Amino acid sequence: MDLQLDKKSVVILASSQGLGKASALAFAKEGANVTLASRDEGKLKEAAEEIFQATGNKPSFRKCDVTQPEEIKALFRQAVKEFGTVDVLVNNAGGPKAGGFESHEDEDWQTAFELNLLSFVRAVREALPHMKQNGGGRIVNIASSSIKEPVEGLLLSNTFRMGIVGLSKTLAKEFGEYNILVNTVGPGRIATDRVAHLDEIRAEKLGMSYEEAKQQHEKTIPVGRYGTPDEFANTIVFLGSFANTYVTGQSIVVDGGSTKAY
Ligand SMILES: NC(=O)c1ccc[n+]([C@@H]2O[C@H](COP(=O)([O-])OP(=O)(O)OC[C@H]3O[C@@H](n4cnc5c(N)ncnc54)[C@H](OP(=O)(O)O)[C@@H]3O)[C@@H](O)[C@H]2O)c1
């Protein structure tokens, strides 16, 4: 299948490691002009070099804390300056603080809102005019499997990821006429640093080893293992490609079958 991504300008937020970086690599393999962003310039430089070595395609990168509106604006200015426009936006951010209702103060709620929902709104605002002008665009929002079934001990994720679903579905309706397709993808347990960190917290809480905590999770996944970042990225790249011409407003989980809800 030709994904029609050659020379397309793709902006990927929170992409110095994990799911964002894996998605960037997958787009670069398809010949896209990728712009990476995160808070850590050193990590971004390494990620860009790694992607260049693997694909021969050199990503642009810029330090951008997604909670800072001016930094988001500057990121898009750079992408447009380097690659002429923005065709595809992949929204992503660091995970919100873990915990249940009684462990969060107003400040935690506000921080999670700004990190995990408002940042997506602001990036969409910057990308849309270019997509409209180009006669089309693709937006893929990375959320969590909590868009189908709440995850125990992750109240802030359970709350704000559903905001992403509402945002995506509404944008899909509002901008379908411009050939701008918008979808949400929820990872289940994909082996990244974030998941290793959550397993460590859980292992400590339950007084077991990290390996035991991981194995407990693996037993609940029908395919019997955690996913890899590149497996996850394959779904992002298809939805963010111009081979995708008719899937929009959807929420899809990539979870090895672990979500029990329909
Ligand atoms: N992996 C999974 O299975 C899984 C499951 C459910 C949900 N998720 C969600 O999917 C997202 C990505 O997960 P991941 O596993 O790839 O996490 P990760 O390995 O921890 O990577 C997070 C990325 O976000 C960047 N980042 C964090 N805060 C940022 C900020 N304020 N501004 C800009 N960039 C920021 C980090 O870069 P810097 O440190 O360089 O800024 C890093 O590149 C998270 O929201 C996570 O909660 C993941």
Image: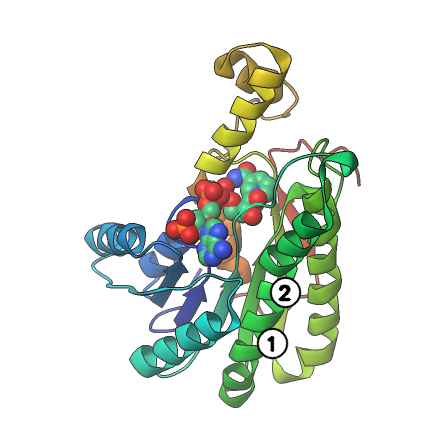
Q: Position of residue 114 (x, y in %)?
A: 62, 60
* Colour basis: rainbow
Q: In the displayed structure, would residue 69 be above or below residue 30? A: below
Precedes in sequence: disc 1 or disc 2: 2
Are the residues tagged 1 and 2 within 8 Å (C-beta)?
no
Please, what secondary structure does the residue beneath circle 1 have?
strand
Name the residue located 53 percent from the left edge and 78 percent from the top edge: 126
Query: Which label sits on residue 180?
Result: 1
Q: In the displayed structure, would residue 40 be above or below residue 61? A: above
Q: Position of residue 11 (x, y in %)?
A: 43, 67
Please indicate whether residue 111 sits to the left or right of residue 81 in the image: right
The residue singled out by tag 2 in the image is 118
Please indicate whether residue 113 sits to the left or right of residue 5 in the image: right
Name the residue located 76 percent from the left edge and 38 percent from the top edge: 150
The amino acid on which the numbered mark 1 sits, given as a three-letter code, is: Ile
The amino acid on which the numbered mark 2 sits, given as a three-letter code, is: Leu
Q: Position of residue 212 (x, y in %)?
A: 54, 12
